[in-house]
Image: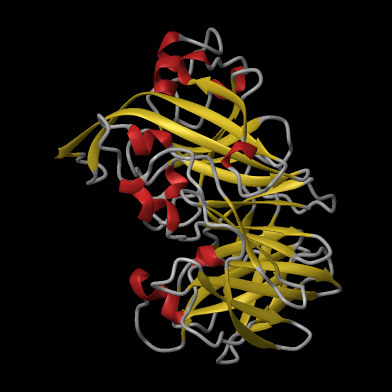
Amino acid sequence: MFTSAAKLPPWLLTGSEGYIGDDVNERTAIGFTKKQLSIKATFFLNSPPQPSKLCVHCPDAKDIKNPRVLCVVGDHILFRVAITTRSIRIRSTSALLWSEYFVYRAERNRPMLKLLPDPPTDTFNDSEVGILPHGDGVFTIAALLRRRPCLDKFELLLFHSKAGNWTSMILSVVGPPKKFPIEVEDRIDDLSCHLTTNVIVIGGEYGTIAWVDLWGGIVLCDILSEKPMLRTIPVPLPMGHITGNNGQGFHFGRGMDCRGIAFINGSFKFVELELDTTELIHIRDKETGFPTLIVHGWTITTYSNSKMSCSYEDWQKDGMVRSSEVTINNPMVTHSYGLLPSSQEHSESEETREALQKLVLSDPSPSLGGQGVVYLVARVKLWHPKSWLISIDMRNKTLQSVVPLATPEEPYEDLMYCTSTQ
């Protein structure tokens, strides 16, 4: 059940995929599309681990896809929605081309919904853009696009709501080149070619924003500075992907599958997930259509970085938990909406613990509450359409919560949920 209470939780988990519907509350805002269609946005807040959700309604559209939440900062939500007034069906592969971008201030009894003008360049990816609120409905949108084939040149796009227009500038990374602590010649492209996976809005006097490549590192920019500059911070090296597979390494793939990051109380917090698996490539699961993946166990490792220089040594290991160590002390967790077998006699059975170790986990993220909790997406099979959000207490090595996630339209490459403080 969604809540619309006046009191905001200190931080939120917001599903990246919203839904289409005519649901309203005291945060509902009305705006207009490019074709002057009336469009309505409503935000339903929930305290973690329950995800908060964005609802969009445009009754006169011929076709409309579920909205995508791109960034949440405070009560400001940047989202896009693919919409058309023509009698055609929008394919998921072309949704970006039909998308219109909105800034939604989900303030109780004083909401706002503003359509953004088209940027002066090709559409940016969902993972490349963030919003920096300034108060009283004033905000800045920032997107950072890598200028191929250059490794250290980027295009910074800025939209200042007061000016009402986009600006663009080409920036190069300043500072010494990245120095790897080990020999990585065979993986240099994977670790040096920045591909943004998510954006972290740090804020402050100069409006610092971090564009994160979960494999290669972080690009920081003070977007409110008179002369914005780019500087970099490495992330922990993915040693398993570099040295595993009998020294051949593994394909890096989607970074969110096994890595996550957040900025909490002046420090970056990083989490890495390792699955011990056997992949039966030639055996397709009849239910999902994807290759069969057998999980034998998993390990979660957390790191922190308060120095934020260009050194790998700044990252300090905070803790590590193996699936075999995780206990289930909360009886309510065993009634986990079908994810784990429940026991009527006690909260933890051998069958339940074994099922927990065999889950296909992905999308780890540190809790912004700062309690040493890590959130993960859990499935019983690889890319099963049904998924859950679970939380692991790293300090006490316990399964803290299990809640269902909304089923996405299809497996998605970008973030499945956004974290934000209030």
188 to 22, vertically: above or below: above
Q: Nearer the viewer, residue 3 or 305?
A: 305
Residue 20 place in picture, x, y as percent: 53, 66
* Residue 253 visible, this angle: no
Residue 146 place in picture, x, y as percent: 48, 70
Q: Residue at x 40, y 13 (%)?
A: 351
Q: Quadrant of residue 34?
A: bottom right
Q: Residue at x 67, y 81 (%)?
A: 159
Residue 12 place in picture, x, y as percent: 69, 48
Q: Would you say 137 lies left or right of 149 here?
A: right
318 to 64, vertically: above or below: above
Q: How is the image coloured?
A: secondary structure
**View extreme (bottom): residue:** 35
Q: Would you say 322 lies left or right of 306 here?
A: left
Q: Residue at x 64, y 86 (%)?
A: 166
**View extreme (front): residue:** 176
Q: How many marks?
A: 0
Q: Would you say 122 lies left or right of 422 here?
A: left
* Residue 138 visible, this angle: yes
Residue 183 place in picture, x, y as percent: 39, 40
Q: Nearer the viewer, residue 4 or 144?
A: 144
Q: Quadrant of residue 49?
A: top right
Q: Nearer the viewer, residue 347 or 10?
A: 10
